[in-house]
Amino acid sequence: MEYARATATPALLEVNAPLIEEQAEHRGLVDRAGALRVAQRVFRAATALIAVSEEVAQYLEGFPGGQGKTHVVPNGVNPDHFPPDLKRSLPAADGTFTVGFVGTMKPWHGLTNLLEAFALLHRNCPATRLLLVGEGAQRQGLAAQAASRGLTKAVQFTGAVPADEVPGLLASMDAAAAPYPKLMNFYFSPLKVYEYMAAGLAVVASRVGQLEELIEPEVDGLLVPPGDVAALAAALERIRREPELRLRLGEAARAKVLRDHTWDGSVERILQLAGIELPAQIRLQSQP
């Protein structure tokens, strides 16, 4: 950032998280004062700061070097990865309703709540499957939780998969969940939710942070109170029971994301912040 400033070159710094606070809480921070000095130095030198969410933007604005030059550019998708006719790579038995999740299996993703909600759903309709895509520290505990509830055959773990396998797995789902629990500071821009929506899935997400802005309830998804297992189960049951709703939500979600949240659109916005105007033919090519 300082080299760019010295050479009069636009310097844009993307910030995905309040990293100092995240490091201190989850991994351990040896020299907080030093970390703050480095952050302030780089924020001051940057031409513009790009935050992935309003919450990260508020964090950056708390630094003198970040005030007045912070812009929000959320995560997005590559439409080419989610063609509407994509085949299911992991289909379930005919007539089975599949609820899915993609991501790391860590406490702040609310997977224990999702498994509890699925248990309620499965009790009412045994022809249901929970497809969990990803790996993480909670994997073993979730498997034990599923076994204790007699759900071993109904809950399917894929483990870690390459990124290019995710679209086919999303195509294998009927609904997708982002069941975040109550968190003191929800600053994420959940890539999984943008990809759920691009895949045309009916999404059930917690009413927190950026998700409350992204998803319009009853139009392109459903929102439930964070940590409310009964509400999550009821929303999933409703999507299972109402295929017309499921289709309508998925189509609207896909249309919104491909219109407003592609990576091409994000890049164009970032280049504009740098004072770089794309040629008209490139802008046209970037439209989904």
Image (spheres, rainbow, N blue to C red):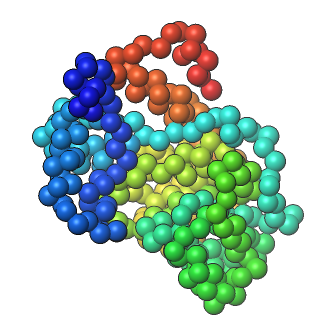
> Residue placed at 75% from the left, 56% from the top?
172
Drawn side of residue 256 relative to residue 6, left or right: right
Q: Would you say 97 lies left or right of 270 here? A: right
Residue occupying the point 58% across, 54% down: 203
Q: Residue furthest top?
A: 280
Q: Image height check: is 53 above or below 260?
A: below
Q: Is residue 3 left or right of residue 148?
A: left
Task: Residue 34: give x, y in percent of width and height.
Answer: 17, 55
Tell me if residue 121 comes above or below residue 85 in the rendering: below
Q: Is residue 287 above or below residue 215?
A: above
Q: Position of residue 50 (x, y in %)?
A: 33, 36
Q: Is residue 145 visible?
A: yes
Whole-percent x, y for residue 160 in the image: 64, 63
- Across and down, in percent, residue 256 comes to 56, 36
Rendered position, 16 above or below 205: above
- The N terminus lies in quadrant: top left
Identify which residue is drawn at 34% across, 51% down. 17
* Front-most of residues 248 and 132: 132
From the viewer's side, name the closer residue of 19 and 172: 19
Determine the image quadrant of residue 6: top left
